[in-house]
Amino acid sequence: GAGVAAYLVAGMLVSLLALLAGLWVVHRLATLELGDADARLTVALVALFPTAYAFSAVYTESLFLALSAGALYAGRLGRWRWAGVLAALASATRSTGVLLVVPLALLYLYGPRADRPGPPAVRSRLRTRHAVGRDAAWLALAPIGLVGYLGYLAATTGDPTAPFGVGRLWYRHFAGPFGGVWEGAVAAVAGARQLASGSRAHVYFAPAAGDPFFVAVHNLGDFAFLIFAGVAIVGGLRRLPVAYGAWGLCAIAIPLSFPVGPEPLASLPRYLAVAFPVHMWLAGWTRRHRLTAPVVIASTIGLVVLTAGFAAWWWIA
């Protein structure tokens, strides 16, 4: 009815406005670390990522991008009160936001941070550059948003654990820290065997809804995104301040630890869309190797294909 349509329009409007805010903050962060040219390319790569269709849907992607990037930007500027508040809002938006305490703590201890510029040289990479002060207490706000959301659910539904239990309906299970990497690799091999067999009569992986060839393509595609993520995170840890690579890893830690039975890496490509350090590294890498045009074109084609599937109500995670 009209009420549902109004909620849909309002949700899309919030997503689009949050996307604009998120892209602006990502540009500011990337400018500080990479310069203006790579910053502009970073924004383009975020906006044209194959799963960027989610930024215009009534999903949490756009809002989480704005809040998570905003928290790191505030920390980068040394505004720790705002960093803590934005991290809390991010954890209220998506439980992954709790892990923002990791990159924020690394920024606080190792920099770079505008409130304490020009740190002295250190003898060891493990030795912290900045002493802990009272302003570090603001980082403890990160989990408050999630706690507040669970409290809201307790008051309105009587079940504060609903977000965790609902994962079982999607066949999510805890496979240990990053256990989904192994399960995703196994599913990718099974998917390749399924396609190579040319037959739908025998299914080589855990049964799932839909055509087994379609599921096989999903598993192979998800694993390709995982390989890209691994390369980008390692590259980011080498080329960017450690806080950024750490956030790239934290941003995908939950889906990699709670895989889905039939499609272990389901939703990983969407999680990568908001892992902006991945795109920061990719921007620098493509420019150094003069591959900007091919990468942007390939990403745009992927976005068009997945958006068409999403609009046609296909299962696109």
Image (spheres, grey):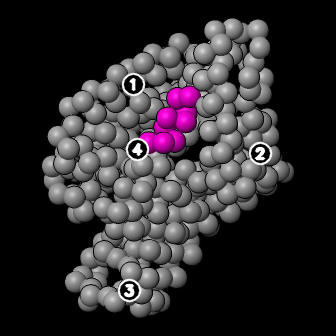
| Mark 2 residue type | His
Q: Are marks 1 and 2 in contact (CB under 8 Å)?
A: no
Going by the numbered disc 1, the residue's amino acid type is Gly
First-in-chain label (1 vs 2): 2
Mark whose residue sits in front, 2 or 4: 2
Circle 2 sits on which residue? 173
Locate residue 256 relative to residue 176 in the image: left or right.
left
Visible residue check, residue 217: yes
Tell me the CA gap for discs 3 and 2.
Answer: 39 Å
Residue 258: horizontal and vertical position, in percent?
70, 47
- Whole-percent x and y of residue 274? 44, 46
Q: Dot 1: within a 10 Å radius of its alpha carbon, few (fewer than 14), some, or many (20 or more) residues?
A: some
Q: CA distance from mark 2 to mark 4?
A: 31 Å
Q: Amino acid at mark 3?
A: Ser
Which badge, 3 or 2, is on the more N-terminal residue? 3
Residue 60 image point, x, y percent: 53, 42
24 displayed left or right of 159 = left
**Quarter of the image where the N terminus is located:** top right
Q: Does the magenta stretch mainly form a helix, a strand or a loop?
A: helix
